[in-house]
Amino acid sequence: MIRSILAGVAALGIVLAAPTGAATAQSRAVASDQPIMIGADHVERTTTGFSLSGRAEVLQGDNRLRADRVQGAGGDSGGISQVTASGNVYYVTPTETIRGDRAVYTVSTSSIVVTGDVILTQGRNVLTGGRLTYNIDTGAAQMEGGTGSRIQGVFYPEGTRN
């Protein structure tokens, strides 16, 4: 079943609208309020935060950010304010998978920006482009084309078989 619908096409981007419904809104609304957990083969504390490498991952609620390397920056209160991932980046939610070369998650805006050969999948639906801005609380996404490239996608109507 298609959970997002094509909301509009712009010269440089496509916007996907999040599904409506009380259950979805409640589960998404708290994603950015969840604690942030980290894991990796190698963890290093830096003067401004932390550095992860080797099976590096950051988890928040049901969402997972995996990459070759992850850098975290601390906020004024000692928490995490921003996470930057690079190399084989995957951001996985219960309903979407986003793949790219680099990602920056800004905690205060609940948004993650993925760049470099971006692939967004939702079920069988696939959207590709150069830059994706994704709101982790609402599921809203905006895809932009890369330098000289177009946005492409394949969307399956509801009720179609594999």
Image (cartoon, helix red, strand yellow):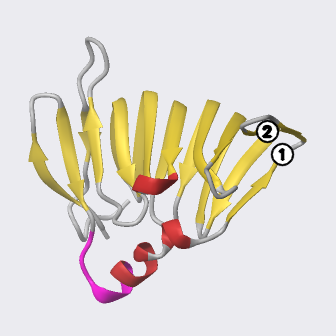
> Mark 1 or mark 2, which is nearer the start of the sequence?
1
| 66 sits left or right of 15 in the view | right
- Judging depth in this view, the residue of 112 and 16 nearest the camera is 112
Front position in the image: 99 or 106: 106
Query: What mark, if any, has residue 52 been given in the picture?
Result: 2
Mark 2 Cα within 10 Å, few/some/many (few <14, many 20+)? many
Residue annotated with mark 1: 40
Horizontal side, residue 114 vs residue 41: left or right: left
Q: Position of residue 73 (x, y in %)?
A: 65, 41
- x, y percent for residue 87: 64, 27
Residue type, numbered disc 2: Leu
| Residue 48 point in image, percent of width and height | 72, 37
- Total labels drawn: 2
Q: Looking at numbered disc 1 in the image, what kind of residue is underneath it?
A: Ala
Q: Is residue 122 above or below residue 12?
A: below
Q: Which residue does the image show at 10% across and 29% down from the upper left? A: 11
Q: Quadrant of the N terminus?
A: bottom left
Magenta segment includes 22: yes
Q: Secondary structure at mark 2?
A: strand
Q: Are marks 2 and 1 in contact (CB under 8 Å)?
A: yes
State yes or no: residue 26 in magenta: no
The residue segment tinted magenta is: 19-24
Q: Nearer the viewer, residue 110 or 139?
A: 110
Q: Position of residue 129 (x, y in %)?
A: 33, 30
The residue shown at (34%, 66%) is 138
Q: Label 1: how many residues lie within 10 Å, few (<14), some (14-19) or many (20+)?
A: some
